[in-house]
Image (cartoon, helix red, strand yellow):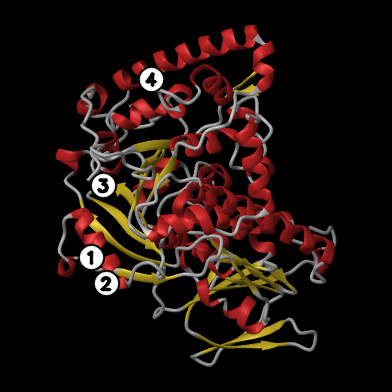
Amino acid sequence: MTNNESETPRTVLIAGGGTAGWMTAAYLSKAFGHTVNITLIESAAIPKIGVGEATIPNLQKVLFDFLGIPEREWMAQVNGAFKTGIRFVNWRKREEGEGPNHFYHPFGVLPAIDGIPLPQYWFNDTLGRGEGVEYACFRSPAMMDAMRSPRYADGRPAVPSAWHFDAHLVADFLMRWSTARGVTRIVDDIVGVRLNEQGAIGSIESKSGRTLTADLFIDCTGFRGMLINKALGEPFIDMRSQLLCDSAVAAAIPNDDETLGIEPYTSAIAMKAGWTWKIPMLGRFGSGYVYSSDFATEDEAVRDYCALWGVKEGQVNFNKIRFRTGRNRRAWVKNCVSIGLSSCFLEPLESTGIYFITAAIYQLAKHFQTRDFDPVMVDQFNREIEFMYDDCRDFVQAHYFTTTREDTEFWRVNKNELTLSDSIRDKMALYKSGMPVNPPTSSEEDYYGSLDQEFHNFWTNGNYYCVLAGLGYLPDRPYAPLAYLPESVRKSRDVFRQIKRQQRESVEEMPSNFEYLRELHSKENSGARSPALRNSNTALAATTR
């Protein structure tokens, strides 16, 4: 921000509520306090999408730590649960007589031994045969199989984790938090947007007759893009040729927690024309079938969804969604910034929706400036958002074109006909050669030490290795320098043995995810841990329903 406060934007108007709107309102109100007057207008009539109920680990550090809200406090308000990674089910070809296959993509940054990431040592030793890379290199898969909590009974973290929650409850929680700190909330419909003489947004007209002005407008109107696309005419770059899914049917499914437990991970279950997410929380799990309308009708998607969970269509209250895949050419145009679905959308295979929001509001606060909106700062913001989106798009694409599945037309087209960017081609060439996909990071502490680093090259070597090796897509050869580094290879084997010991200890020591969450959300919780939580060492059978 400039030192000349008279030149700074004094008023901000956020168009649209939901998760994107209220995360933005909360963050900016904390960042700028009473120096900026923030108003949010949202409609009571427009339903919130709420597709992204799963997150990645930076949410606490980037948002809630910044707001000063402890994890236990906000989790208790939003039916929060833990996520230690993603379990991919049936993404590989099933051999004759084979049951459901799966692999994990756990959270965490893997160590580098003498500058070489651990997965390179795994492949050097195994050539991809036998134990999967995630079981060899991460502590958490054994805990996921046993449905253990990623938190010790006293609340200390054991392994990196993110969260599952009800996105509507998160929006409501942040609405209450923000309005208590001075954000003005208007419940009204936007019926018009007027441009000024410079072609920027001059005002917003509401159904009740209000004329709302601001120095900076933030578009959180979802796929409609009422300000950025419709009023300002900024083109949306459609990327459906790169990712085929364009629709979803979603619902909440009841869960018998006592009998089945609560899985501490998101599941992504491959289907005939896409995949279904499963996001476990207390008492239920959120689930949605993400599919391509070119390969399945809505009725077919509903039928296959109901068959997966063993429910009847009339018993389920479906949210039926059509979405656009891609991003705006520019996320910030003149005096308008788009955040959330109005800016970009990527199917939620790697839980990028809320990640995109947190990245955008962090970069917005970082580039917040004078009322003249210095084009150098605006251009830099746009480059940051473009890189973030395209990097994530590459990673999600890699789940599709590397598959061995060819049993339906959807999977055959994904394998053979997707439009691939130069950047993903380069990454795949590195991977196939045995090289690390991205430069190694020495430790998780280093990786999470910089918020800017967190938003660059997020999909690091361990992420690509977990997904590609899990799909059966392996390098052509081990990383060549390892042939000349026998001492480094010896050290790596010590690390692999240490990980195995940590896996056994974690399963023995950690409470079940269900019991930890039950205690966390208990109305009677006064800070004391229940005996059941302290002494729970019985592994609940993991199920793929």
Which quarter of the picture shows residue 37? bottom right
Q: Which residue is mark 4?
A: 503
Q: Nearer the viewer, residue 320 or 163?
A: 320
Count all numbered tags in the image, as a single digit. Answer: 4
Label 2 CA crowd tier, 10 Å (few <14, some 14–19, many 20+): few
Residue in the image at 48% along x and 19% along y: 126
Q: Nearer the viewer, residue 1 or 85?
A: 85
Q: Secondary structure at mark 1?
A: helix
Residues at discs 1 and 2 in contact (Cβ within 8 Å): yes
Q: Secondary structure at mark 2?
A: helix
Residue 438, given in percent of the width and then of the height, sits at 66, 36
Label 3 CA crowd tier, 10 Å (few <14, some 14–19, many 20+): some
Residues at discs 3 and 4 in contact (Cβ within 8 Å): no
Residue in the image at 41% along x and 63% along y: 50
Viewer-nearest of labels 4 and 1? 1
- As measured in the structure, the alpha-carbon distance from the residue carrying label 4 to the one carrying label 2 is 44 Å
Residue 326, given in percent of the width and then of the height, sits at 58, 65
For residue 299, the mark is 2
On the question of residue 154 being in view, the answer is no
In the drawing, does residue 537 fall left or right of residue 174?
left
On the question of residue 382 being in view, the answer is yes
Q: Secondary structure at mark 4?
A: helix
Viewer-nearest of labels 4 and 2? 2
Residue 437, given in percent of the width and then of the height, sits at 64, 36
Residue in the image at 57% along x and 61% along y: 24
- Furthest-bottom residue in view? 209
Amino acid beneath label 4? Gln
Q: Which residue is mark 1?
A: 303
Label 1 CA crowd tier, 10 Å (few <14, some 14–19, many 20+): some
